[in-house]
Amino acid sequence: MPLPEYGGALGQKRAAHLLRRATFGATKQQIDSFAALTPAQAITQLFRQTLSDPVLPIDPKTGSEWVTTGTTGANSENRDLMNYLLGWFLGQMMNSSLAYSAREKIVHFLHTHFTMRTEKVGNTRSIYYQNQLFRQFALDATSANATVNFKTLTVKVSVDNAMLELLDGKLNVKGSFNENYARELLELYSIGRGLEVDPPATSGQEGDYGVYTEDDVKTAARILTGWDVDDTYKNIDPDTNLPRGKVKGSETGTNASSHDNDETKPKKFSSNFKSTLFPDNTITPDPLLMPAGTPTEDSALDEITKLIDLIYEQDETARHICRKVYRFFVWAPHTKAETDPIEANVIEEMANTFKANNFKLQPVIENLLRSQHFYDAAAGVTDDGYGGLIKSPIDLIIGTLKFFNVQLPDLSTQTEQFYAMTSKILSEVENLGMAYYNPYDVAGYEAYHQFPVFHRYWITTSSLSKRYIFIEKLLDATAPLDPLTVNSYEFIKANFAGVAANAEALVKELVIYLLPHHDDLTFTDGADTTASLTAKRLIYFKKRFLTDVNTDPEGYWTTTWNAGTDLEELRLWLNRLLNTILQSPEYQLA
């Protein structure tokens, strides 16, 4: 059954929590508007809106798109086009619409799951079409088509041009098998290898991983044989209307000559798999799709579909995928003591919802984001949700920019300025330890899969100091023409004018919007027994704010703010306050 849901109005704290996790961040006004909604209403606002496809990326050298029409000698160099494409991805994340941002958050999740590396796949068109494939499947519950689901997406990814390049699917042919994609399909993208904190039982034989075996990898590789990258992008998938790979053989797909169809070696999986669809765990080609017994594109694709059907018959597949959803949107347990109750009470129910909805992912995410568990509202739940997840560089930077209402230039009318700004943001993201679209290896960004560190991977001595430097540069009053700077005085005046004259009220209000923990705030030391942020911490923020102001700092601040004449000094004080809050360890948490 679905996770029990929270039914009351969100309030400011829960609204901010939801928008930090479900989107790439929100403004003060957006948080305020969501505070009046119930989780069900909020999720409808985020995930059930009609959204358009994004405007295509533009090559500033030609003034037109290249991802669907292809390039000519008039286009920019491929390296530049790749930078433009990644900047365009970032532009989708920074869209001011919360519903658009929520969709792009799922697109980003799919990218972290089905990894891509530009260092290996240098073709911008392949990477664009894969990203668009994720976008088509991100909101799968809004489609009445039952086959628009995560299981079908796994089939589509298996013959996606970018994936065929990344994991050498194009080199996997009968008689010379390449197991790279088959291995990652099982280990990373579908069934997984069980909980690393509590590994599954095995037979003790070499190559038995408890969930599947080394021989299963080999059998899956045989089923996946015979595909190639289609660099003409003319082989169109009839379901998505997007280009996909092609079979090696005739251009018409009538002869998949490199597909392994050796009838003397059945494509049989180990007893680790339990199947009612495929007797004896054996996948056989459909003779109706093979005129004269010759493999075709249709028969090869049908075998891949059957392979994915077999994998998704296994209960562990739903659990593995739901664990990744949970780690992305909620938290990553690091020990067996932390893992066991989440597995029993949350992951199992998420997996049940996943299977009950024919493997559509959106219902799982929506139920999770409406749940009592997500809002720490269930009986006996402690504060694991709020402030339990370290922000990725993407979330930290984009979330900060969106809160301060930093806007990107218009792609269509200010193309070069758009790419200059997105390039600068991507440089900051990489500087903080996330090589966007180019993780260290094919397993993807360590924070999303590497036990037991998970999201703690984002924080190192070096990266933490660089996070603080990013904030310092953002508030740099000496760089007024830099598009990645914020005028703190103008921001506070526009958003917090009602409390700005009172130093303590301003500190409290900023903490409430910027930090995940802010219950029962007080500046009275000793009266903070129920506060989630100590009085000493608030006093520290205020002291840093008003350092060297006057013998009566709070009164002097009130007088100076109300006068509104010494803007340079006001901005200096506000920069100190914002730097102190935004450079705090608490701000690194979502």
Image: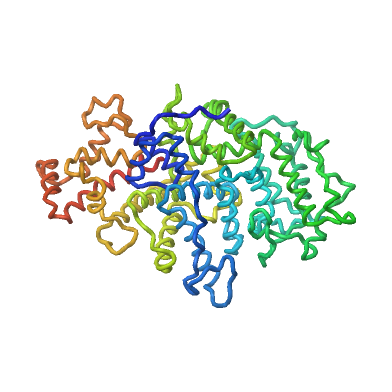
Q: Which residue reaches farthest top?
A: 379
Place residue 479 in its image quadrant.
bottom left
Residue 550 coordinates in the image, percent (x, y) = 11, 45
Residue 192 located left or right of residue 486 = right
The residue drawn where x is 45% and y is 29% is: 6
- Residue 507, above or below 180: above
Residue 430 located left or right of residue 401 = right
**Location of the C terminus (image quadrant):** top left
Residue 121 coordinates in the image, percent (x, y) = 61, 61
Residue 246 coordinates in the image, percent (x, y) = 73, 60
Residue 400 coordinates in the image, percent (x, y) = 36, 49
Residue 372 is at least partly visible in this image: yes
Residue 131 located left or right of residue 514 = right
Of residue 311 and residue 211, the one placed in the foreground of this image is: 311
- Residue 423, above or below 536: below
Place residue 271 in its image quadrant.
top right
Residue 175 is at least partly visible in this image: no
